[in-house]
Image: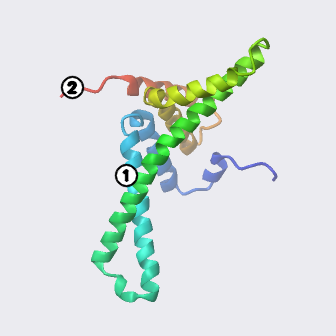
Amino acid sequence: MNELASFAHLLDGTPVVVRAIVGLLGLVLLLRGARWYEPSIRLGAFGAGALGGVSAVRAIALWWPIAWQPAVVIAFAIVGGVIVTLTALATHRLVLVGLGALLGLVAGVAAQALVAALAWWVPLVSAVTGLVLFPLLYRKLLPITTSAVGAMLIAEAAGLADRGWVILVLWLAGVLVQRRPPPEA
């Protein structure tokens, strides 16, 4: 089989628990993705860094067993978590700028292809425009994008990825739920 395996093929034969976790993650993204986006980045990055810190202590302890002390493990976990969180936040901003430039460039090239009379510099100007605007607009786009990812994950987990109408209905429901203003206390 020379085709690349789709996500659905990766889930074939996967235990129900894994499908449930994928579906639950999809449900969270579908209904709350925009509101929990940045805390999720921080929490996920801190968790990955903390695990990296614990792994570093484990490796050090192979040669220096006294390093495997609770205080040392906790300190490495905290430091690793903080370093990776700060790196993730800085990288996130850079990715937004790069993605904005890329989207702007693609829009400019598409416009140039549709309207042959456009000047050569149109894609360049649109790339700079995307570079500036996308980081400002991405928060407004989060309900749309996180709902789309959530809908796809739910459909994949349920084995319904081949039914586009299911993904469309889930996506629209997710956008409507996320666009709804938060309840007042």
Q: Which image quadrant for residue 70? A: bottom left
The residue furthest left is 185
The residue furthest right is 2
- Taking depth in this image into account, of 143 and 111 the one nearest to the observer is 111
Q: Is residue 140 above or below residue 67?
A: above
- Taking depth in this image into account, of 61 and 124 the one nearest to the observer is 124
Going by the image, does 157 lie left or right of 79? Answer: right
Residue 121 percent location from the top left of the image:
71, 22
Instruction: State the residue at coordinates (59%, 42%).
Output: 159
- Residue position marked by numbered label 1 in the rendering: 43
Q: Is residue 69 above or below residue 104?
A: below
- Residue position marked by numbered label 2 in the rendering: 184
Name the element at disc 2. loop
Going by the image, does 181 lie left or right of 51? Answer: left
- Taking depth in this image into account, of 13 and 113 the one nearest to the observer is 113
Residue 86 percent location from the top left of the image:
40, 52
Q: Is residue 9 above or below residue 160?
A: below
Q: Quadrant of the C terminus?
A: top left
Name the element at disc 1. helix
Instruction: Residue type at mark 2: give it.
Output: Glu
Instruction: State the residue at coordinates (33%, 64%).
Output: 78
Q: How is the image coloured?
A: rainbow
